[in-house]
Image (cartoon, rainbow, N blue to C red):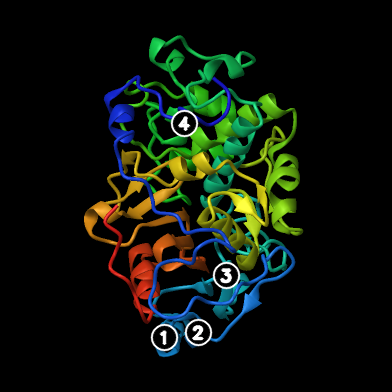
Amino acid sequence: MSGVTGLLPAATAVRQAAATLALIVMVPAPGAAAPAHPGPAPPPVPWPTRAWSTAAPAAVGLDAQALAALDQELASGRHGYIDGMLVIRHGRVAFERHYAHDYRALFAGKGAPWIYNYYDPDWHPFYKGTKLHTLQSVSKSVTSALVGIAIGRGEIADVNVPVMPYFTAFHVATDPRRDNLRLWDVLTMTTGIRWDEFTATYTDIKNNCAQMEASEDWVQYVLEQPMATEPGTTFVYNSGATELLSYLLRKATGKDVADYARERLFTPLGIRSFEWKHTPRGLADTEGGLYLEPRDLAKLGYLYLHEGSWDGKQVVPAEWVRQSTRWLVDAGWHQAGYGFKWWVLSRPADGSYAAYAAIGYGGQYLLVVPQLDVIAVFTAWNIYDERSFDVRLALERVIASVTERPAPASQ
C-alpha cells in the first residue's frame, strides 16, 4: 500500500493499542481559523521562509518578565552550558537570547581532536566556528520527516514494509525475529535489537552508540547486534536503528540523505545553511549528525505545527505529521510517549496541553505546544557536569510564560 494512509500495522498488541490513542491537536495554518485563545486574533504573518517576523512578548500574549527571569537563570549558569533560547508564538519571534562559553578551554585534557569526540570544539557544539549548532538526536526527528516525504512520494511503500530486504548486501546472522523487523518498529524504537546507550554516557566506549560511532561500518555494527525481543513489543532507545534509515533512504530514493533533505525539506522551508556529518562509509549520520541554526530548527516545529504544510505546499504529508507526534508507545523515560522519532511529553488525556518535542544529547530541545501556538528552541552542551536543563522544566517555563491560557483541550 503506497502513501501514508493506514500507517499503523496491526501485527502486535503495541501497534493495535497505538491506533486508539488520541490525536495531538494541531493548530490551523495561517489564513485559517485562529487558535482558540482569549482576545483578538493576531494579524496574519508572512511565512518565515526568508526570515522570521518579530514581536514584543506582550504583543503575542507572552509574559516578558517570566521570560526575562528564565533568561537570567540560563545566563547565570544555573542550568549548565546553555547556548541559546528562542521562543516563537503566533509565527513571530518574541524572545531570543544567546550565551557564550569558552568550549576551547573546556576541551583541555579531553582527548584528541576527532569528529566524534564530543569535547572537540571544532565539532561540538558549533560546527567549526559557525552559528550551526549540533542537534544530536533531534536529527532523528528530521530523518523521520524525510521518511514521511519518501512514503508520500511512493519511494517507500508504507510503514509495514519489511526492513531486511534493504540490507541484502550485509552479512547478518539468521534470526526469524530480525526477519520480522518492519519500518514501524525502527521508527518507534521497538526493533527488538539488544542495545544499551543509557547505562554508560555517550563519551564512554561501553555505550553501544559510542561503539557504533567508533566502528568503520555503522550499519554492519547495528545489524550484528543480537535480537533480544520480538520487534514491535518493547521500547528500547537505539540510535543505531535510526542509522539504518540512512541506508534505507538512500536505497529507496537513490540519494544521500543530506541531498534529499536539501531538495525535499530544507529548500522549501528556506533553510540554506546546514551541515550533516557522514560515517566512514559515506552515509549521513541520521542518528545525530545534523547541524542547524536555532531559527532554522524552529522552522521544522512551525512546519509540524501546521501539519506539514508550508506556504500553500504540502511538504510533509499531514497524516505523517499526525502519526509521528502521537503517543504510539510508552517510552518509560520522563513519563513520555514516543511516536515516529518524536517524543510526546504530554497529551490532553492527561489533563495537560498536548506537547511534543525533538530532543538531543547535551540539551537540544525543539518544543511544540499546538494549542498555545508556541514553539521553543533551546540549544546547550551539558556534557561536562551534572548541571542540566530538564526538558520538562523547559516546557513548564515556556507554558507558564503564556499570559492567557485556555483550558487544555479534552482530546
Of the residues under marks 4 and 3, which one precedes in the sequence?
Answer: 3
Q: Using the image as rendered, state which of residue 168 and residue 307 is in the foreground.
A: 307
Image position of 113 (left or right of 3): right
Task: Tell me residue 145's x, y (percent).
Answer: 57, 43
Of the residues under marks 1 and 4, which one precedes in the sequence?
Answer: 1
Label tally: 4
* Residue named by callout 2: 57
Judge depth for marks 2 and 4 and give the one in front.
2
Of the residues under marks 2 and 3, which one precedes in the sequence?
Answer: 2
Q: Residue furthest left?
A: 350
Image position of 128 (left or right of 325): right
* Residue named by callout 1: 63
Q: CA distance from mark 1 to mark 2?
A: 6 Å
Q: Quadrant of residue 16?
A: top left
Q: Using the image as rendered, state which of residue 407 and residue 356 is in the foreground.
A: 407
SS at mark 2 in the image:
helix
Task: Tell me residue 312's x, y (percent).
Answer: 67, 53
* Residue named by callout 3: 91
In the rendered image, is residue 387 in sight? no
Q: CA distance from mark 1 to mark 3?
A: 17 Å
Of the residues under marks 2 and 4, which one precedes in the sequence?
Answer: 2
SS at mark 3 in the image:
loop
Q: Is residue 191 above or below residue 341?
A: above
The amino acid on which the numbered mark 1 sits, given as a three-letter code, is Asp
User: Who's the residue at 42% across and 28% down the image?
Assistant: 185
